Amino acid sequence: MSWWGRYIGLPFDDAHCWELVRRVYADQRRIALPFYGEVDARDLASVARTIEAGQGGDHWQPVAQPQLFDVALMRGRSRIWHVGVMVDARRVLHTEQATDAVVIAVRDPAISGRIIGYRRYVA
């Protein structure tokens, strides 16, 4: 089984999108990402503001071609409000209330039009 198989099916209520990224980074890379505990995953405006405020930090660099463990930024309407973590250059692990945690191709119609960029964590 691939490393990401252990995350498939995690309920959205147990691991919303940022929490899923945090878990992957902690488990797989031994990196503790910030906890935004005060943001309700269902409050999309707060999630968007939090992600936008943190995306330009010193550790997150924009990349054109995603790789393993890069973070995919996705939009809803006109703002960033969702993230996932790349399992390779073509697929992303993410979770939504309707699906729980899944791996999906970035070219899949369900998300292809929503991805607006990728960020790579650099220490």
Image (cartoon, grey):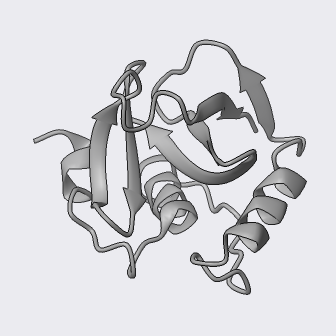
The front one of 69 and 110 is 110
Q: Quadrant of residue 6?
A: bottom left
The front one of 87 and 74 is 74
Side (left or right) of 104 relative to 54: left
Q: Quadrant of residue 81?
A: bottom right
Residue at 80% over, 64% down: 50
Quadrant in which the C terminus appears: top right
Q: Is residue 59 above or below residue 14?
A: above
Q: Is residue 110 above or below residue 48?
A: above
Residue at 48% over, 42% down: 85
Furthest residue toward bottom = 38
Can you give x and y, in whole percent of width and height, for residue 79 in the image?
75, 49
Furthest residue toward front = 77
Side (left or right) of 98 relative to 8: right
The front one of 44 and 119 is 44
Quadrant in which the N terminus appears: top left
**Could you tell me how many numbered marks the image carries?**
0
Residue at 76% over, 26% down: 62
Side (left or right) of 14 relative to 51: left
Furthest residue toward top = 65
Side (left or right) of 91 relative to 48: left
Can you give x and y, in whole percent of width and height, for residue 58 in the image?
89, 41
Can you give x and y, in whole percent of width and height, for residue 54 in the image?
84, 54
